[in-house]
Image: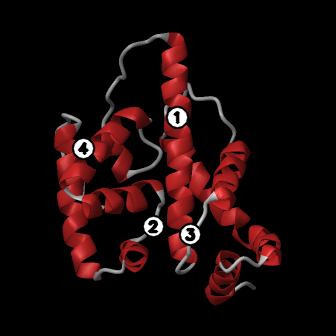
Amino acid sequence: MTLPKDITQLLVDWSSGDPEALDKLMPLVYDELRRIAGRHMNRHRPDVIIQTTVLVHEAFLRLVDQKNVNYQNRVHFFAVASKAMRRILINYAVARAASKRSGGHKRLSISKVMATAKEEPLDIVALDEALKVLATIDVRKSEIIELRFFGGLTLEETAEALGISLFAVRQEWKLARGWILRELGKEGTHDS
């Protein structure tokens, strides 16, 4: 059984330039990357045709290509991986919409999606637009939404990834979710 500290050490070794660490790391993180990709795919619009495996591989390639990234621990690595997956799906959705010349995006209920992953699919482009606006107002709240919603991190893991208290994450999660719901123009909030 692989311990989180083993993964963290391999991440440190990889960040320090050890190419063998990457070869050892991939099999240890692959299943978790697939789980994160699955969460993204479950929340994405059904007309996006990309396989989970393709999403994992594209995200991993982006992670490998990043320069000067020092992963603090496995939670930080998975948070960065989740963000990469989100960007890939957004880019794919935007390109697909442009090719169809649809012009607009249907806004769907985020409250249902945040309550359970198996509810209606979310227009990821609309959520991305809202997150960009939120980031201009409060970067940390935007990061919390991204880590919790897309990355599937728990409140505790989010606090660890951001280096803040659990209390702060709980408070900012509630505020950020409320803001996103209002920004998307939907009523109702569900506590998760």
Which numbered dot is residue 138?
none
User: Residue 176 appears in which quarter of the rendering?
Assistant: bottom left
Q: Amino acid at mark 1?
A: Asn
Q: Amino acid at mark 4?
A: Val
Q: Which residue is mark 1?
A: 91
- Asked if 57 appears above or below 125 in the picture, the reply is below
Mark 4 and mark 1: span between their CA atoms?
Answer: 18 Å
4 or 3: mark nearer the eye: 3
Q: Amino acid at mark 3?
A: Val
Mark 3 or mark 2, earlier in chain:
3
Q: Position of residue 108 (x, y in %)?
A: 33, 31
Mark 3 and mark 2: span between their CA atoms?
Answer: 20 Å
Mark 3: give few (<14), some (14-19) or many (20+) Cα within 10 Å. Answer: some
Q: Which residue is mark 4?
A: 133
As rendered, which of 13 and 34 lies closer to the eye? 13
Q: Position of residue 53 (x, y in %)?
A: 73, 47
Q: Which residue is mark 3?
A: 69
Mark 3 and mark 1: span between their CA atoms?
Answer: 22 Å
Check contact, mark 2 vs mark 4: CB within 8 A.
no
Check contact, mark 3 vs mark 1: CB within 8 A.
no
User: Residue 78 appears in which quarter of the rendering?
Assistant: bottom right
Mark 2 and mark 4: span between their CA atoms?
Answer: 22 Å
3 or 1: mark nearer the eye: 3
2 or 4: mark nearer the eye: 4
Check contact, mark 3 vs mark 2: CB within 8 A.
no
Q: Residue at x 35, y 23 (%)?
A: 106
Mark 2 and mark 1: span between their CA atoms?
Answer: 23 Å
Q: Amino acid at mark 2?
A: Leu
- Asked if 94 appears above or below 83 in the picture, the reply is above
Q: Name the secondary structure under disc 4.
A: helix
Note whether residue 164 is visible.
yes
